[in-house]
Image (tube, rainbow, N blue to C red):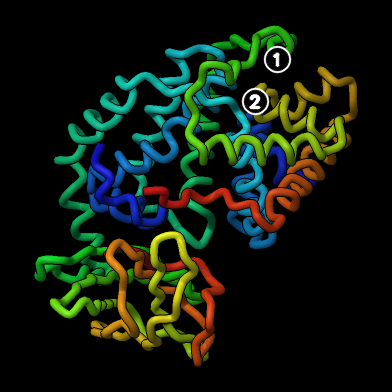
Amino acid sequence: MDAHELTAAYALDALAPDEAERYERHLSQCEECREQLAELNEAAAALAFAAVAPAPPTRLRAAILETAAAERSNVVPLLRRRWVARGLAIAAAAAACVVVGLAVALTRSSHTSYVSMALSRDASGSVTVQFSGPVAAHGKTYEAWVIPNGKAPKPAGLFSGGTTTIIRLKGTVPNDAVVAVTIERAGGVPAPTTTPILSART
Amino acid sequence: MNRQLAHLSDEALVLLAARTEQSALAELYDRYGRTAYGLALRVLRDQALAEDAVQEAFLTVWRTASRFVPERGKASTWILTLVHRRAVDAVRREQRRRADSLDRAPEPSIEGVDEDAWLRLQRERVQEALRRLPDAQREALELAYYGGLSQSELAERLGQPLGTIKSRMFAGLSRLRELLGEPGTEMSWTPTS
């Protein structure tokens, strides 16, 4: 039996344990199946939303968080080291009106990069973004957006990244607006074409 | 409820959870816990078992968040895949499933369920997409995903060759993906606050 044919069944958890094992071995050597599985997994997970969902008992949330907290002391040191090793820098939240966002830059590079931003609003109402992240890939730019509550995103500036960049957003930023950053083609675009890598409410 | 992290994407929350930021796990639970519980309940038909499956899945998120690879898929897909796997493992382990369990055990009714608007929208979209599938494909997906049947059990139950079952699952899931990818369909969590 061809392991290729098992992708849908695997995504639905419809393989017997020995079949699933065999498929996983195949998966480690087949890029095509990995890509197809990612797509079919997403469709399968969507089925979860079709089930009628009564509210779970509140004790369930408490039980999960309590158990997680109890395990915390065991995992912190290792994870901290790993985190630092990945070269993450989170912008320090120094000013009074600061929001820190954290997200993954979905660039086409083979590794994950971490980006962050801190927003601060000065007395005149303009907003400054302190952005930390890698230089944008060739032919790409970061683009900042101001999204007033319930309205369409407005372009608020282009920047190329690199360690820490401080930019002042174009125009006025209404209270409660969302500031977002997307990766766009060089030169920028009038409306975002990609999912924001960062967003924060001012 | 602490919604300080409400502006962050699911993927960013997983990154924060990898730093053992407990509020990130809480936010992920607040976004997907209900869907996860609904799924586990649909598969297991038993509240205590469903709670166990959801708890195990979220603790797996907590323990393995640092290994999550965003390029391979969305965080919500990862979480719900973990929940589904735990639920299917449990249903097989408990051997509670009978050949006619899907026909007999009633699906939880939506009546009296206080569902938020976003969840209702997602549910209606996926249900509508399911309705648009050919009956044989929908049946295969539902028996496998909600019933926890393996492909061999499906073949036996439906009296079809295994190859036919595989084709139906593949065609059904691929078509479902296309239908859900149509404009106006967005499965990601969006901030409402």
Indicate the secondary structure of the residue bearing disc 1.
helix
| On screen, residue B161 above or below B72 | above
Indicate the secondary structure of the residue bearing disc 2.
loop
Residue B93, position as x, y percentages in the image: 54, 16
Q: Please report the residue visible at 30 percent of the width from the left and 61 percent of the height from the top.
A: A176
Q: Please report the residue visible at 89 percent of the width from the left and 29 percent of the height from the top.
A: B161
Residue A116, position as x, y percentages in the image: 28, 70
Q: Are marks 2 and 1 on the same chain?
A: yes
| Amino acid type indicated by mark 1 | Leu
The residue nearer to you, when weighing B91 against A60, is A60
Left or right: B2 as drawn, with respect to B82: left
The residue nearer to you, when weighing A37 against B181, is B181
Residue A161, position as x, y percentages in the image: 34, 85
| Amino acid type indicated by mark 2 | Tyr
Circle 2 packing at 10 Å, graded few (<14), some (14-19), many (20+), is many
Q: Quadrant of the C terminus of chain A?
A: bottom left
Q: Please report the residue visible at 49 percent of the width from the left and 29 percent of the height from the top.
A: B115
**Pointer 2 chain:** B
Q: Which mark is residue B146?
A: 2
Residue B87, position as x, y percentages in the image: 52, 25
Q: Which mark is residue B102?
A: 1
Q: Quadrant of the N terminus of chain A?
A: top right
Left or right: A123 as drawn, with respect to B68: left
Compare marks 2 and 1 and give the one earlier in the sequence: 1
| On screen, residue B107 above or below B83 | above
Query: Can residue A85 be seen by looking at this rendering?
Result: yes
Location of residue A100 by image quarter: bottom left
Location of residue A196 by image quarter: bottom left
**Pointer 1 chain:** B
